[in-house]
Image (tube, rainbow, N blue to C red):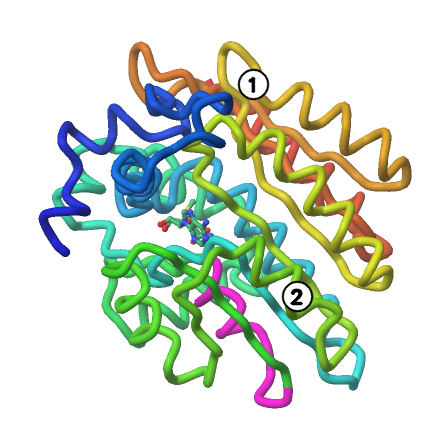
């Protein structure tokens, strides 16, 4: 199993976020894949490891907005559901060789932590993670949710990569999360609308396969029709050739009331294609505009 999942080349150069899209990820080929090719396809799809990118500027945008939103939602004394389709491992060690190698956390949270007051829900989740797991620990979105939500809330997390799934299961066990080694989008369609009915779905794919950009608007449409009260947040990278553009046009057309928040930042290193990131938010809470505006101002100060 380990051999199957080991990337053939450096994972950092192959991932969808700023790196190369997998060569065999042509949508026309996908429908006719034989079982053998399908296993190659699966292996490529699972080569992404968020440890190389944890705490980068895109995470700062996504995780701070997520923490702020969940904190807003728990002000109401009613239980909620949090679900993630692409959860990652939940807990990251920013002193690991993978994180040091890209230097993305150094240019990300390690530079920007002072953008957020200690009372900000993002700072609080980071502080709790460091207190429990050590100073170089950084919370992925599942741990941000775990540290922000209450015992009465329900957490569903999907992660397909076996090693990431095992790490996620371990990292989130204190929060009683339901952790699935299943395709996240299919699982979301099957269990939403959830019980409790109010809540948030985070969709945070690695965009290693070009078809993600076509599949996502269709699946979000399906979910939004079934769960019209749910908050649905989609994260996407802004790459130099803007592959997200068609997806975003389609989402905007289908959900005209949704909010879009985009930030730009310098590439992590020369030749890196990610120059920003975006969040597409259906049913975001009242008052989020102020938080987003503050974040935009912070990002615009980056050189
Ligand atoms: C960008 S990472 C998630 C990061 C995490 N949301 C965070 O912010 O901390 C994307 C994850 O999705 C996983 N993944 C890829 N395809 C998947 C699928 N179809 N269903 C569930 N997980 C998948 C990858 O293994 C990877 O760990």
Residue 94 placed where, x, y %?
Answer: 24, 50
Residue 248 or residue 111, whichever sits in front:
248
Residue at 49%, 26% (x, y): give it.
210
Residue 236 or residue 140, whichever sits in front:
236
Residue 202 placed where, x, y %?
Answer: 60, 55
Residue 266, compared with residue 190, is above or below; it is above
> Which residue lies under the disc numbered 2?
70
**Highlighted range, magenta:** 141-152
Residue 53 or residue 41, whichever sits in front:
41
Residue 5 placed where, x, y %?
Answer: 19, 47
Residue 103, compared with residue 81, is above or below; it is above
Which secondary structure lies at badge 1? Answer: loop
> Which residue lies under the disc numbered 1?
243
How far is the residue under mark 1 from the one under mark 2?
29 Å
- Asked whether, in this view, residue 257 is left or right of residue 134, the answer is right
- Asked whether, in this view, residue 222 is left or right of residue 216, the answer is right
Residue 130, compared with residue 113, is above or below; it is below
Which secondary structure lies at badge 2? Answer: helix
| Prevailing SS of the magenta stretch | helix
Residue 18, compared with residue 292, is above or below; it is above
Residue at 65%, 29% (x, y): give it.
262
Of the image marks 1 and 2, the number of the one nearer the N terminus: 2
Residue at 25%, 30% (x, y): give it.
12
């Amino acid at each position: 199993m380990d051999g199957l999942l080991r990337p053939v080349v450096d994972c950092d150069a192959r991932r969808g976020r700023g790196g190369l899209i997998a060569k065999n990820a042509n949508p026309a080929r996908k429908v006719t894949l034989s079982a053998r090719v399908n296993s190659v396809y699966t292996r490529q799809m699972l080569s992404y490891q968020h440890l190389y990118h944890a705490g980068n500027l895109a995470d700062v945008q996504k995780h701070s907005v997520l923490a702020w939103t969940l904190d807003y939602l728990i002000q109401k004394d009613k239980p909620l559901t949090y679900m993630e389709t692409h959860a990652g491992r939940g807990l990251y060690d920013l002193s690991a060789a993978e994180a040091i190698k890209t230097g993305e956390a150094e240019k990300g949270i390690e530079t920007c932590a002072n953008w957020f007051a200690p009372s900000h829900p993002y700072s609080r989740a980071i502080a709790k993670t460091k207190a429990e797991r050590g100073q170089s620990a950084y919370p992925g979105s599942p741990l941000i949710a775990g540290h922000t939500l209450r015992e009465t809330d329900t957490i569903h997390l999907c992660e397909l990569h076996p090693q990431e799934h095992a790490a996620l299961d371990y990292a989130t066990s204190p929060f009683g999360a339901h952790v699935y080694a299943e395709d996240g989008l299919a699982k979301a369609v099957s269990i939403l609308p959830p019980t409790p009915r109010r809540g948030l779905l985070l969709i945070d794919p690695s965009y290693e396969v070009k078809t993600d950009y076509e599949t996502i608007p269709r699946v979000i449409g399906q979910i939004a029709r079934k769960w019209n009260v749910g908050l649905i947040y989609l994260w996407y990278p802004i790459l130099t050739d803007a592959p997200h553009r068609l997806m975003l046009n389609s989402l905007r057309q289908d959900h005209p009331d949704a909010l879009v928040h985009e930030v730009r930042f310098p590439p992590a290193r020369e030749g890196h294609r990610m120059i920003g990131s975006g969040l597409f938010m259906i049913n975001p809470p009242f008052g989020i505009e102020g938080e987003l505006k503050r974040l935009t101002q912070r990002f615009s100060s980056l050189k």
